[in-house]
Image: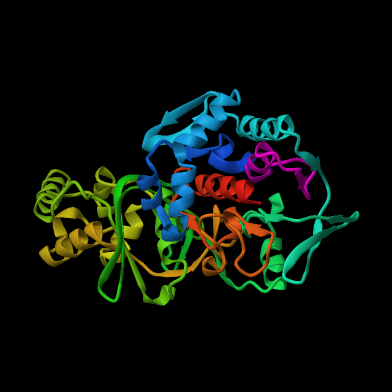
Amino acid sequence: MAAYAAAAAGKRVLLLEKNEKLGKKIYITGKGRCNLTNDCSAEEFLANVVHGGKFLTRAAYAFPPARTMEFFESHGLSLKVERGNRVFPVSDHASDVTKTLERACLENGVQIHFNESVTDIEEKDGSVCAVHTTRTNYPCTSVIVATGGCSYPSTGSTGDGYTFAKHLGHSCSPCTPSLVGIEIGEDISAAQGITLKNVVLSARRDGKKLFSQMGELLFTHYGISGPLVLSLSALINRLPLSEVMISLDLKPALSEKMLDERLLRDFSERKNETMKNVMRGLLPAGVVPIILRAAHITPEKQANSVTREERRSLINVLKSLSFTPRTLRGFDEAVVTSGGVNLQEIDPSTMRSKLIKGLLFCGEVLDCDAFTGGFNLQIAFSTGYLAGLNA
């Protein structure tokens, strides 16, 4: 987007790509379908930014989601809007998004070099003067760093941009994985692979609510994942996890009283059956042992011998199953990187460095990140457009 915007404004542009093709990370976004933006207003887009929302305000209004959709459609890519206003190509092929961006660049005269890695950005007297690569050196007046973060390093985003930024005097916030699964202390192996829908995940720190949302949660071999968990990870990735308490309401549609009545009815109708069998009427089989263990009820216990205290304990667990977060999964599984080039050192209306003339930054290399739903790619398009315009 930065290369396209610069070339469309009449500048001579060379796009240096270290991979054998463009947009390698785009191919794996949206499970290979590419959720390229969100059909919402600039204000709604900014409301979904977790870090850097104030900084992104000018970029969001200069190139809002509507402009992104208009750009792709005007360059021949038909779009569709799905649940949560997520925007996808009609073809359901992420490769079509990459092809459209590449075509827009080539039509505007962008030169593209593949398999060429940048090794250094040279400055002289406070201005960018050349880019050194594995092949040669290029004298230049502007350099846009659009290298992405550290997430999915197999796609080529290995944190190069932070190295260039630091070498040129910029500071960077520590990078952590975001939109990623959470490893927990509890043994939930019995439920591995089970997805729970319409559950409420909550998190607290020092008694204050950090997060509470209804949606989908997936049990994995290491802990928890799924849309709810990815969103939560974006809010806690910079906090000491030992201070975060996570809980899950498995039956948000039922009050404690209603749940108690439901249990009494089930116990009465199946009084001679074991608890592990009776509870399968309420929960997926793999989740039952986890719930009974947390409620301190033996799976083989008969329904008619469950005490009032045990029933009370069971209700508490069903309404608030606790998880102890140990760590977030790594960059190889993270959708985005949280952290990056210090925003105070970048002009938010141009994406220019305040320290080095002719140096600009855009996209994930900046200390900006958002929730899932097309918002992180929108950050890339909005900041990329401004950087290209102002290079």
Residue in the foreground of this view, choosing between 44 and 275: 44
Residue in the foreground of this view, choosing between 141 and 378: 141
The question of residue 348 being in magenta is answered with no
Splitting the image into 4 quarters, where does residue 96 fall?
A: top right
Q: Percent position (x, y) of residue 137? A: 88, 57
The N terminus, quarter of image: top right
Q: Percent position (x, y) of residue 338? A: 52, 62
Q: Answer above or below: position of 36 versus 76.
A: below
Q: Answer above or below: position of 267 versus 74.
A: below
Q: Which residues are magenta?
A: 1-25
Could you tell whether 213 is left or right of 23 in the image? left
Residue in the foreground of this view, choosing between 22 and 325: 22
Q: Answer above or below: position of 12 versus 296.
A: above
Q: Percent position (x, y) of residue 352? A: 61, 59
Could you tell whether 182 is left or right of 316 in the image? right
Residue at position x 74%, y 32% in the image: 106
The question of residue 12 being in magenta is answered with yes
Residue at position x 28%, y 48% in the image: 277
Could you tell whether 162 is left or right of 113 in the image? left
Residue at position x 60%, y 54% in the image: 362
Magenta-highlighted stretch: main secondary structure? loop
Splitting the image into 4 quarters, where does residue 145 fall?
A: bottom right
